[in-house]
């Protein structure tokens, strides 16, 4: 087989596409020549709403054999090195400026333009806080619009393949209020399951909200939780151990 044979893989992020290559070719990431294929499609200001697909072109390095992987220890060591190098290359101030440019233009288009925002880096994440009167429409039913808006901001931050940057959006303190409500719900559901001995399946939630439920119910000795379904309709099942 020609080791210079070219393969193309797709993913929502560069890392996801590379992981598919490693999985299908059954070869260590360190044995691949990887090239991110540039998207030649010029995107308009709001085209960030379109689902992002990243393509990578990979070739086996000289001496690499398809189907032969290195030890887990070697893989982890190399992956740690790659993550460190990628982290060092991230220019957070540049990303924050890009988000500010987007938000300045976005706020001008709102029917309630008196909206203020604050952006800061906290523990490796970029936190965006929006505050204003009558902007509940940016939150939506149980945070659906807020979560979609957060995805847009994350796509802006990661448009150059910086998958290690995460954007956390909060609007008028909604996250704190929602977390409190979910913890209360988790407690009530746990009590119901213990009393009736019947499992309960909750409505679909985002990964962020499911984590709140899972974490809260870890405190319950008689209860266990697990998730079922596919995104964005993934649900939590609460049952007796």
Image (cartoon, helix red, strand yellow):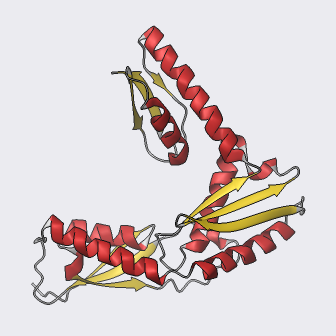
In the image as oriented, which residue stretches furthest toward the front?
Answer: 123
Say how many tags the image has: 0
Which residue is at a point 33% across and 77% down the rendered structure image?
82
Residue 188 in the image: x percent, y percent? 56, 20
Residue 26 in view, yes or no: no
Which residue is at a point 89% across and 59% down the rendered structure image?
111
Q: Is residue 90 left or right of residue 128?
A: left
In the image as oriented, which residue stretches furthest toward the top?
Answer: 196
Q: Is residue 7 above or below residue 148?
A: below
Q: Is residue 85 left or right of residue 43?
A: left
Q: Is residue 144 left or right of residue 14?
A: right
Residue 224 in view, yes or no: yes
Q: Is residue 104 left or right of residue 27?
A: right
Residue 64 in the image: x percent, y percent? 12, 82
Determine which quarter of the picture holds residue 14. Answer: bottom left
Determine which quarter of the picture holds residue 66. Answer: bottom left
Depth order, front residue of 210/184 = 184
Residue 236 in the image: x percent, y percent? 46, 34
Q: Is residue 37 above or below residue 212?
A: below
Q: Is residue 136 above or below residue 224?
A: below
Question: Which quarter of the image is occupied by the C terminus?
Answer: top left
Residue 2 in the image: x percent, y percent? 13, 88
Question: Which quarter of the image is occupied by the N terminus?
Answer: bottom left
């Amino acid at each position: 087989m020609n080791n210079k044979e070219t393969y193309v893989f797709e993913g929502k992020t560069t890392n996801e596409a590379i992981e598919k290559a490693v999985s299908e070719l059954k070869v260590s990431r360190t044995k691949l020549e990887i090239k991110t294929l540039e998207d030649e499609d010029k995107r308009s200001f709001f085209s960030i709403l379109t689902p992002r697909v990243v393509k990578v072109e990979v070739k086996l390095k000289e001496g690499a054999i398809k189907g032969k992987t290195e030890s887990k220890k070697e893989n982890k060591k190399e992956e740690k090195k790659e993550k460190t190098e990628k982290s060092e290359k991230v220019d957070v101030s540049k990303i924050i400026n890009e988000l500010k440019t987007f938000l300045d233009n976005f706020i001008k288009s709102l029917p309630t333009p008196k909206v203020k925002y604050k952006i800061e880096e906290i523990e490796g994440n970029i936190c965006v806080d929006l505050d204003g009167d009558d902007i509940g429409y940016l939150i939506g039913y149980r945070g659906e619009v807020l979560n979609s808006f957060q995805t847009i901001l994350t796509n802006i931050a990661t448009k150059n393949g910086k998958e290690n940057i995460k954007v956390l959006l909060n609007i008028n303190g909604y996250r704190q209020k929602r977390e409190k409500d979910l913890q209360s719900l988790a407690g009530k559901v746990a009590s119901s399951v213990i009393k009736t001995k019947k499992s309960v399946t909750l409505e679909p939630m985002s990964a962020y909200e499911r984590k709140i439920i899972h974490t809260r119910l870890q405190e319950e000795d008689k209860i266990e939780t697990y998730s079922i379904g596919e995104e964005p309709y993934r649900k939590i099942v609460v049952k007796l151990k």
